Amino acid sequence: MKIRVNAEDKEVRPNLNIYELLIDLELNPDQSGIAVAVNREVIPKSKWQETKLCEDSEVEIIRAVQGG
């Protein structure tokens, strides 16, 4: 299944949810400071495991970074 992650095309397995996608992208979904939007709608962290991605979903992943 094809989706778009941060403006980059990705091929992923069908029925993938947000939580699994983050793991596949080697991000820790339990880490604080990560926000995810699917098709321009911010998805609360509490819904990541139940939010399945569909063909052509557009996913934006934002990570807060400390520093100055």
Image (cartoon, rainbow, N blue to C red):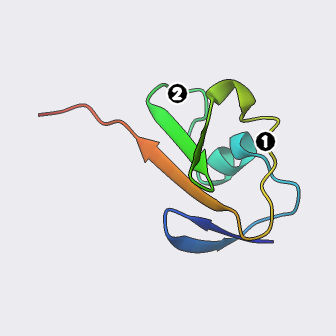
Image position of 35 with respect to 37: above or below: above
Residue 1 lies in quadrant:
bottom right
Image position of 13 with respect to 66: above or below: below
Residue found at x 81% / y 48%: 52
Q: Residue furthest left?
A: 68
In x, y percent, where is residue 43?
63, 37
Q: CA distance from mark 1 to mark 2?
A: 18 Å
Residue found at x 52% / y 54%: 60
Count how many numbered circles sit on residues in the image: 2
Residue found at x 56% / y 52%: 40
Q: Residues within 10 Å of mark 2 (few under 14, many from 20)?
A: few
Q: Is residue 8 left or right of residue 11?
A: left
Residue assigned mark 1: 51
Along the viewing direction, whichever of 17 and 24 lies nearer the viewer: 17
Say what amino acid the circle numbered 2 marks. Answer: Gln
Q: Residue furthest right?
A: 15
Q: Residues within 10 Å of mark 1 (few under 14, many from 20)?
A: some
Residue assigned mark 2: 31
Residue found at x 82% / y 36%: 50
Image position of 48 with respect to 30: above or below: below
| Sequence order check, earlier mark of 1 and 2 | 2
Q: Is residue 9 left or right of residue 54?
A: left
In x, y percent, where is residue 62?
44, 45
Along the viewing direction, whichever of 34 and 38 lies nearer the viewer: 38
Q: Is residue 53 left or right of residue 14?
A: left
